Amino acid sequence: MTAAAPPPEALRAPLVVEFPFTRSLGPVQSAFLTGLRERTVLGVRTEAGEVLVPPVEYDPATAAELRELVEVAATGTVTTWAWNPEPRRGQPLATPFAWVLVRLDGAGTALLHALDAPGPEAVRTGMRVRIRWAAERSGAITDIACFEPYESTEDVDGPAPHDGRFDEPVTGIVAPARLDYTYSPGRAQARYLAGLGERRTIGERCPSCAKVYVPPRGACPTCGVATTDRVEVGPRGTVTTFCIVNIKAKNLDIEVPYVYAHIALDGAGLALHGRIGGIPYDEVRMGLRVEPVWSEDGRYPDHYRPTGEPDADYDTYKELL
């Protein structure tokens, strides 16, 4: 009796999706963020008289344009909270803290931020807090470093009118968006990745509709059945559609402009993504026949280049657009 072979080790890899989000600011958001730089918190008054902090440009109830700015206090009351025992990269504090909604004095809505507290037992709904300003401020929500507990019996003035004018106003922001996660490809895609290491492209065929999926998914999303039959496709293929990239990506050593395309490998039932090289970007076209150029370590196609064959007839790939 022979022992069963151990199951293959599951593949896992850390992945990061990151891009900068750039936006221009209208008069309300510009005043709000510039105010934070100057240690001033501004809200906006609605048609019904409610003060919204953070301010918005249109009344959420009537959709009317809002422009009446008011200054509120840097102190407030916690309306609800949740404890964060393990802060992640980029969060306001490096030590455990509470996420809190704080209704600043003079405001009718609550602002989400971090509360610096020694533990969850020190946090409660209704507790009084105040803003701890960042030492260096640039006109961003991070100019509020966090909130901190604050006990005071002093009366707080109501919201005061403010013209929203500051020297050198902030007119635009760049907010980095980032997602860190661990990806496990599963058995079907693990076999696909192993095949790429041998310079082979392995798909899987649906036993019902006969479509060959590359990369394989383990099941046919149309028929809902397992795709157990493995099929080698390519290596050549056809450009079905493409776009010209004119913006250089961070940490990507490729000069712009370049072409990114959908490529239907011979024998595949749908197109995959790939960069086109070896040809001027303005000569890439639908129907162009291409072949892979492998990376230096031979683990994946770095890009695809023209094969020199005649262009494919549109009818041969129109269903794969």
Image: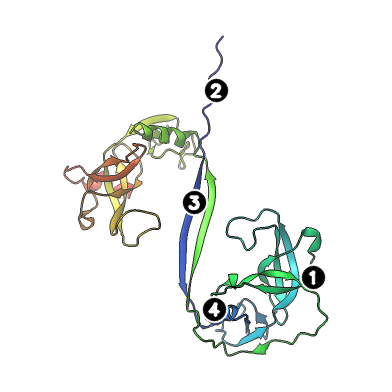
Q: Which residue is mark 4?
A: 29
Tag 2 or tag 4, which sits nearer the N-term? 2
Residue on which the image places disc 1 = 127
* Image spot of residue 246 (x, y percent): 31, 62
Q: CA distance from mark 4 to mark 2?
A: 59 Å
Tag 2 residue: 6
* Amino acid type of the residue tagged 1 in the rendering: Met
Query: Which residue does the numbered mark 3 point to in the structure image?
Result: 16
Q: Is residue 21 above or below residue 183?
A: below
Percent position of residue 65, x then y: 55, 84
> Above or below — where is 8 with respect to 17?
above
Name the element at disc 3: strand
Name the kind of residue labelled 2 in the image. Answer: Pro
Residue 229 as seen in the image, left or right of residue 275: right
- The answer to whether residue 208 is seen in the rendering is no
Distance of label 1 from label 4 (alpha carbons): 28 Å
Cα distance in 3D space between marks 2 and 3: 31 Å
Tell me which numbered mark, 1 or 3, is placed earlier along the sequence: 3
Name the one closer to the observer, 161 or 66: 161
Q: In the image as oriented, which residue stretches furthest toward the top? A: 1
Badge 1 marks a residue whose secondary structure is loop
Residue type of the residue flagged with mark 4: Gln
